[in-house]
Image: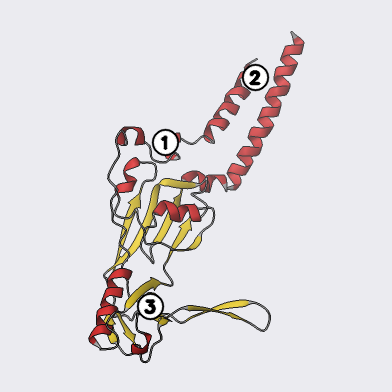
Amino acid sequence: MKLHRLLLTTLTLLTLTGCVSQKKIVYFQGSDAVYTSPQPIAQSYRMAIQPADRISLSVTCSEPKLLTGFASNVTFGTNEAVTTSGGGTREIYTGYTVDRDGYVTLPMVGKLKAQGRTEEEFASIVEQAIISAGIVNDPQVTVKFTNARVSVLGAVNKPGAIALNSQRTSVLDVLAAAGDVSDNGLKTNVQLYREVDGKREMYILDLTQADVFNSPAFYVQQNDMIYVSPNKAAGVKNSPFFTFWGASASIASVVISLTSLIIALSK
């Protein structure tokens, strides 16, 4: 009987070592208290142009004949898909790259400051420059990022570069595209690194708390790097000791079952 109790205690301890506190894995804890009434959404998703960004510009006007050197509808910096001789497809990037000083040089317009401007703001600057240059009087310019992306590393199911197709992209959208935080990921310690005016900043996001929506890093910027820390159990789980421990637990379970059966039959 003492052996039976010892084995049962051992198995219980082995089972408990694999348990993870629910507080470490559940998203947005406390939401029931915070969202008893609708909460205002922080409109802090302004994605500004930075050096080394690549952008394209689309220009239209009502009088095409005035667009000398242009066309009635011309797009500068589009990505061209080219079919190779082997039948594959490769993409050629012909977008305007913002120089290290934050400027873009456009034909017939000249050098314009793009750094710190949103797509809409820089489009307005280009429109005014076209008018000032006497090219056309009613240009309509659309500016788009062509290489906006963030990197996701660490304990996620699909690490890699995630393209940003919208200015309003949250860290949750990015993690969802990366297959979510893995079972070994630490949702309480998601690190986001961001370059701002030539300096690198770091934000710590706790995805288990409802106030994560108020973080200035909740909406991502192009070139952000997100790192999800692994929990301590990840290293233990992959260690030879844990493998041996897990095998021992299985053996112990079989032994307990056999012992229980023998004791039951001997009564």
In front: label 3 or label 1: 3
Q: Residue at coordinates 44% horizontally, 46% vertically from top-left?
A: 186
In this figure, which residue is indicated by the disc labeled 3?
Answer: 57
**What's the distance in space between the residues labelled 3 and 1, CA to CA?**
48 Å
Q: Residue at coordinates 66% horizontally, 38% vertically from top-left?
A: 247
Picture quadrant where residue 5 is located: top right
Work out whether mark 3 precedes mark 1 in sequence or the reverse, and give the earlier one. 1
Which numbered circle lies on residue 257? none
Please tell me whether residue 226 is drawn above or below residue 59 in the rendered image.
Answer: above
**What's the distance in space between the residues labelled 1 and 2, CA to CA?**
34 Å
Q: Residue at coordinates 73% horizontally, 12% vertically from top-left?
A: 264
> Which one is nearer the viewer's eye here, 69 or 145?
69
* Circle 3 SS class: strand
> Which one is nearer the viewer's eye here, 50 or 262?
50
Q: Amino acid at mark 3?
A: Leu
Which quadrant does the C terminus fall into?
top right
In this figure, which residue is indicated by the disc labeled 2?
Answer: 4
Residue 184, how many percent across, how many down? Answer: 51, 46
Q: Is residue 244 visible?
A: yes
In this figure, which residue is indicated by the disc labeled 1?
Answer: 23
In front: label 1 or label 2: 1
Q: Amino acid at mark 2?
A: His
Q: Amino acid at mark 1?
A: Lys
Work out whether mark 1 precedes mark 2 in sequence or the reverse, and give the earlier one. 2
Q: Is disc 1 surrounded by few (<14), some (14 to 19) or many (20+) residues within 10 Å?
A: few
Residue 91, how many percent across, how many down? Answer: 54, 77
Q: Is disc 3 surrounded by few (<14), some (14 to 19) or many (20+) residues within 10 Å?
A: many
Q: Residue at coordinates 32% horizontally, 90% vertically from top-left?
A: 108
Work out whether mark 3 precedes mark 2 in sequence or the reverse, and give the earlier one. 2
